[in-house]
Image (tube, helix red, strand yellow):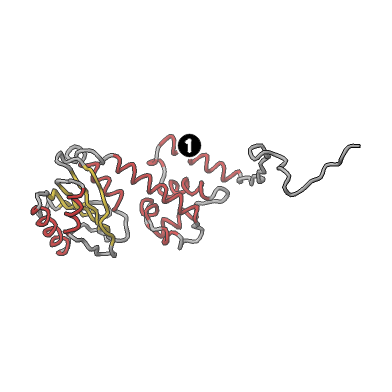
């Protein structure tokens, strides 16, 4: 007589883990007017590049990915009204972005991803290259990385004997109009990296790159500390919103 099968909690699964059928949530249809609008924007972007789109439409293209089933034009305009332009929106701190109604983690992630991508692309054009042959790329990188910051940031670019950029390091972040800088720490780090020259860079969130008396004094102290150890201070760049100032060009070094 055949024995009936007994089932228990210890019995194996009906499907192997990689054979189990997946449950797919029902897709929510995007309204046709939104789908058509997005298609047209993408086509204009692909055919004419970013110059073919105003800031709010370029921002819409980004927001589509984070908010796939909603008209994002009002949010794009709200972000631009709040922060001013596309670059400043992308560069805005996450905490400030989150203050805007309709901005959640997905939107912040998309914006910060674009910012990080821009920084890496700009940085790749200057790292391990001579600053003499890539000065314009260096300025572009500094503008990309620092021009839209809301607080002061101080960076040091370390160069080797051939003036090749071997390291780019943030030395400090401060307040809206001040960042502490310690000349001994700057020179100590140069020695650790075996750097023979430096370029100082910091931003002015006000947008005006005119150096303050404190900027000039700090630069003098760094230059003195570096010279004592045979390290050259090539320049100090102050990055504004749309322009920069070179201490060397201004006769301040």
Of residue 60 and residue 198, the one placed in the foreground of this image is 198
Of residue 54 and residue 65, the one placed in the foreground of this image is 65
Q: Helix, strand, or loop for circle 1?
A: helix
Q: Is residue 215 left or right of residue 91?
A: left
- Neighbourhood count class around disc 1 (C-alpha, 10 Å): few under 14, some 14–19, many 20 upward: few
Numbered-mark total: 1
Q: Where does residue 183 sit, x and y in percent of width and height?
A: 16, 59
Q: Where does residue 76 sit, x and y in percent of width and height?
A: 46, 53
Tell me: residue 20, above or below residue 233. Answer: above
**Going 28% across and 39% down the picture, which residue do you hit?**
125
Of residue 201 and residue 90, the one placed in the foreground of this image is 201
Residue furthest to the right in view is: 1
Q: Where does residue 35 sit, x and y in percent of width and height?
A: 57, 42
Of residue 92 and residue 84, the one placed in the foreground of this image is 92
**Going 61% across and 46% down the picture, which residue do you hit?**
31
Q: Is residue 105 left or right of residue 243?
A: right
Residue furthest to the top in view is: 47
Location of the N terminus (image quadrant): top right
Residue furthest to the front in view is: 1
Task: Write down the residue under mark 1.
Answer: 43
Quarter occupied by residue 80 = bottom left
Q: Is residue 73 left or right of residue 3?
A: left
Quarter occupied by residue 187 = bottom left
**Going 26% across and 51% down the picture, which residue do you hit?**
169
Tell me: residue 196, above or below residue 148. Answer: above
Q: Where does residue 77 sit, x and y in percent of width and height?
A: 45, 55
């Amino acid at each position: 007589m055949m024995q009936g099968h007994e089932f228990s909690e210890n019995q194996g699964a009906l499907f192997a883990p990689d054979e189990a059928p997946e449950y797919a949530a029902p897709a929510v249809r995007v309204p046709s007017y939104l789908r058509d609008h997005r298609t047209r924007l993408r086509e204009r972007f692909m055919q004419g590049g970013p110059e073919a789109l105003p800031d709010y439409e370029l921002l819409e293209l980004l927001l589509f990915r984070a908010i796939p089933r909603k008209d994002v034009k009002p949010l794009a305009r709200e972000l631009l009204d709040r922060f001013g332009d596309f670059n400043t929106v992308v560069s805005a701190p996450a905490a400030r972005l989150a203050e805007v109604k309709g901005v959640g983690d997905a939107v912040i992630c998309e914006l910060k991803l674009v910012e990080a991508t821009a920084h890496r692309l700009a940085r790749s054009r200057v790292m391990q290259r001579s600053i003499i042959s890539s000065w314009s790329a260096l300025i572009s990188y500094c503008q990309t990385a620092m021009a839209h910051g809301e607080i002061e940031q101080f960076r040091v670019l370390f160069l080797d004997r051939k003036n090749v950029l071997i390291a780019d390091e943030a030395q400090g972040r401060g307040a809206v109009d001040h960042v502490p800088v310690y000349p001994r720490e700057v020179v100590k780090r140069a020695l650790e990296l075996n750097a023979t020259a430096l370029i100082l860079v910091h931003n002015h969130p006000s947008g005006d790159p005119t150096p303050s008396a404190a900027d000039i004094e700090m630069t003098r102290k760094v230059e003195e500390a570096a010279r004592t150890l045979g390290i050259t201070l090539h320049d100090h760049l102050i990055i504004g919103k749309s322009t920069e100032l070179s201490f060397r060009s201004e006769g301040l070094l």
